[in-house]
Amino acid sequence: MIGKRKSPTLSLGGDPTIDLLPPELRIKRRGRVLRRRISIGIFLLALIVSGAATLVQAQANQAREELRIAQLETQALARQQQGFLEVEKVKAKISLIEAAQEVGISTEINWHKYLNEVQATLPSNVTVDSVNIDSATPFSSYLQPVSSLQGERIATLNFTATSSTLPRVPDWLKSLATLPGFVDASPGSMTRNESGSYSVNITMHIDEVAFSERYSLAGGRP
């Protein structure tokens, strides 16, 4: 379909004008304007690209600087950690020593104090002459009796007491029953010495109540 050409509009009362420039000059002028616009666009584009490259480079430099600072901090922390490792090693050794001390004294009985208490339960005219002690150790359990009628024990105290008068052994045994950790006691042989005194052998069993528990009483420090 062929479109109709638009008829030129007749302007009445306007200023008369005439364009005497050749068409080639007008085309050249338009080309010059176009080239100028293209040049400006290319310049603006180059400016944007340069600015973006500068920004990226600045960000890269900042990232490298932050990485360097982070590496320095990591090295400093590693050196500090080495110091803490030494402290942890020392603490581990201390804990090991304390554990060994606790195990070592877990079956401890203050025998000096205990024998004084034994002597204190006896009459004033009775003295303890000889003592034989058999007790548990931190590395082995004490041998328990076979009979269920006998109580559990952690030590056996066998001692010989000498009395200047005829011993009242039942009273001695009742007094011994007041001692801490007392399980049972039984008399053995009784002999009369040439001096007229009497010697009685007594076997006494003791349970864990007699432990000194020095570690726990000292708040975890022996």
Image (spheres, helix red, strand yellow):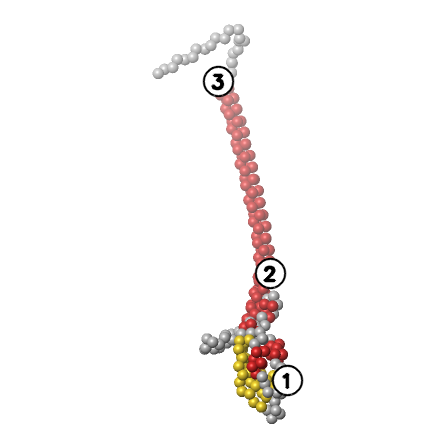
CA separation, marks 3 and 1? 152 Å
Determine whether the residue tagged by mark 3 lies in a helix, strand or loop. Answer: helix
Tell me which corner region of the image, top left, top right, bottom left or bottom right, holds residue 95. Answer: bottom right
Q: Check disc 1 and give the amino acid type.
A: Asn
Q: Nearer the viewer, residue 53 or 196?
A: 196
Decide which of tag 1 and tag 2 comes sooner along the chain. 2
Residue 164: give x, y in percent of width and height: 62, 87
Residue topped by disc 1: 125
Amino acid at the residue labelled 3: Pro
Q: Secondary structure at mark 2?
A: helix
**What is the C-alpha distance between the residues marked 2 and 3?**
90 Å
Farthest-out residue, left: 1
Residue 132 can be seen in this image = no
**Residue 23: numbered disc:** 3
SS at circle 1: loop
Position of residue 83 measured from the top left corner of the image (x, y, whole percent): 60, 61
Name the kind of residue labelled 2 in the image: Gly
65 and 149: which one is in front?
149
Q: Which mark is residue 189?
A: none
What residue is at 58 percent from the left and 48 percent from the top? 65
Q: Is residue 110 visible?
A: yes
Point out the tag, 2 or 3, that comes first from the N-terminus: 3
Q: Look at mark 2 in the image and give the residue it sits on.
A: 83
Residue at x 51%, y 6% (from the top left corner):
12
